[in-house]
Amino acid sequence: MSEDVTIDEGTGVDESVSPPSASERRQLHDMWAAGTEEPAWVVDSTSEGAQLMLPRDQASPGEVAEEGGTLVTDDRLYDDEQYEEETTILNMGPQHPSTHGVLRLQLELEGEIVRRVKPVIGYLHTGMEKTGETLTFLQGPTNVTRMDYLAPFHNELCFSLATEALLGVDLPPRAVAIRVLMTELNRVSSHLMWVATQGMDLGAVSMMIYGIRERELLQAFFEKTTGLRMNHNYIRPGGVAADLPDGWEEDVAGIIEKTPKGLDDYHDLLTHNPIFLGRTQGVGVITPEECFAYGITGPPLRAAGVDWDLRKSQPYSGIEEYDFDVPLGENGDVYDRYLVRMEEMRQSLRIVAQVAESMPAGDYRTEDLKVTPPPRKRIDESMEALIHHFKIFTEGFKVPAGEHYQAIEGPRGELGHYVVSVGEAKPWRLHCRTPSFAAVQALPVLMADQLIADSVAIIASMDPVLGDVDR
Amino acid sequence: MTDELDVSEHLPTTEDPVLPPPLAALAEAFADATIEDSATGQHVIRVPAAHLVEFAQAARDGGFEMFVDLTAVDYYRQRPGPRFDVVIVLVSLRHNLRLRVLVGVDGDVPAAPSITGVYMGANFYEREVFDLFGIDFTGHPDLTRIMLPDDWEGHPLRKDHPVGSVPIQFRDTHKVQ
């Protein structure tokens, strides 16, 4: 090692240290790769400082209780005194295939038993709420659709409903029906992705292929309708971007016919499979009280036996016109969450069939000229129409001052968009309450006192999307 | 016609909106809490920061068992009075109600009491607001940054935080580029 290579041991930025040259960086890298000298700067640069889990003797009692998941109900099986000396803190992620993205978990282990868990998040934080403040209401769905990338239609719908509530526009029935159709199909595709990854995390690798196979049908339909396989920007304030494509009836009929056959296959493969039962039953139990305290909604809450579905209790976007059942579990474990989601897919397909049957004719976006640009044909004929078109897409439309919290039932639970407008074309504040954030927060409750091998099953069963967590 | 129905008494009036019983009980118990008008007909109540914890306790005991959301809004140069609003969303499953609680906080280092003692789920949400708005939640067990690196300077969701042309602040960028 040459003399002029400086290794800064501190954490602060020292202005006197000039940036290393390319050769110095190369040297440092070689030294690190060879492992001949302690690479202090590599250790430093992965440290999250105060966000990391502290050893038990340095952590406050509040932190220990939080990381041990005993704040609501103390269901700890073991005595703290018993094995205080024998614990190890193990880092899992952020580059771990079973953390469903860049989730980092610090696990305190006693043998194979997880004693404390601390999720460290933020690796995917891109400031999307701040970005939302710089985009107009018409551009907003482009931004929010990237948050939960497995349920883009739900994000767009939630933002659009919040904007429309502030605007006070009414939608034609066809736009509402198309929205229900697309979001319920999206729920199926999201749950299919979940069943694929849940199976793979438990060692059933073929489930990954089967789940993706069935999902492909839906993705192809999304691509045909919106032009994109994800990040669709299809549902917008004022309606949807385009009408359903020609031949959509056959596509939807094909999905309704083929997807349940896939679900039957999954039931044959998993539901009574002794290995699957052993890995999931009684694992990762969460009680209704813990769900309420931690804001856990959606399938995990219903798997705990609580009959709460926003589509039934606080309906939105005309969903109350369709018949469907809300499946409930009993034990709140991984297996019940599996059963609830499997049944939810069938119920969503039931809704889709009803929508396809009763799809009203008419316009696919509102006729309110304030939010809807003039038709393409009018632009060729009328100067005013051209100006109108130009103004909507550059300036946007002004939304009356006010604030609105819109909640919808996403595939992962309650998705809420809190939009504050001060009467301008851009939201003053856009906040997204995402179900994955609450799910990650509750991981200590679920994982404490479980085997480390079960931790991947538990993470998968909560179905977090890290784009949704970090935003 | 004399037998014409007088419908006016059945219509809700804006002056005296009928509050659902759990919310009316809360408003009665806390004299300094004010029911706010919502443009879209949602239930909004403003509570002074000093009484937030007692209010949260009363709300949880009064039926709002589920914690849903906690965030903040920076009304920088938008209104007189406190600059920030802490916004809490609670849900009552029993009464099928949704309540939004606003708490105004102000100052260079704005502070609000932490409600983690009542709703444990507020933990990560308060850390997020602390991280991105710089609002201090007194009584929080582990108030550290959650989204941004530990050594980040500033609070990006504040309105006076510039967008763009901000130097990259990640640790050790001067060494490993």
Image (tube, rainbow, N blue to C red):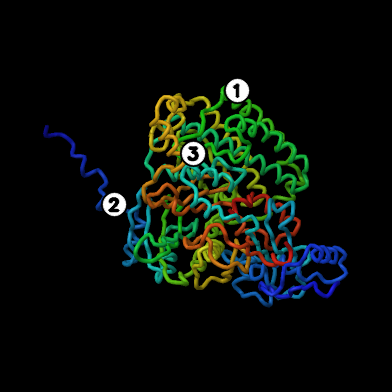
Q: Amino acid at mark 2?
A: Pro
User: Does label 1 or label 3 sit earlier along the sequence?
Assistant: 3
Near mark 3 (Cα within 10 A), the count class, few <14, some 14-19 or many ≥20, is many
Tell me the residue that label 3 is attached to. Answer: A236
Query: Up-down: is A418 above or below A111?
Result: above
Q: Nearer the viewer, mark 1 or mark 2?
A: 1
Q: CA distance from mark 1 to mark 2?
A: 49 Å
Query: Up-down: is A373 above or below A79?
Result: above
Residue A417 as seen in the image, left or right of residue A223: left
Residue A458 percent coordinates (x, y): 68, 53
Residue A44 sits in which quadrant?
bottom right
Query: In the rendered view of the protein, which quadrant contains the N terminus of chain A?
Result: bottom right
Q: Which residue sits at x=55%, y=65%?
A: B131
Same chain, labels 1 and 2: no
Secondary structure state at the residue bearing disc 3:
strand
Same chain, labels 1 and 3: yes
Secondary structure state at the residue bearing disc 1:
helix
Q: Please name whichever residue, A336 or A400, is drawn nearer the observer in this view of the structure.
A: A400
Q: Which mark is residue A250?
A: 1
Please state the chain letter of the residue tagged with numbered disc 3 in the rendered image: A
Residue B40 percent coordinates (x, y): 37, 47
Tell me the residue that label 2 is attached to. Answer: B17
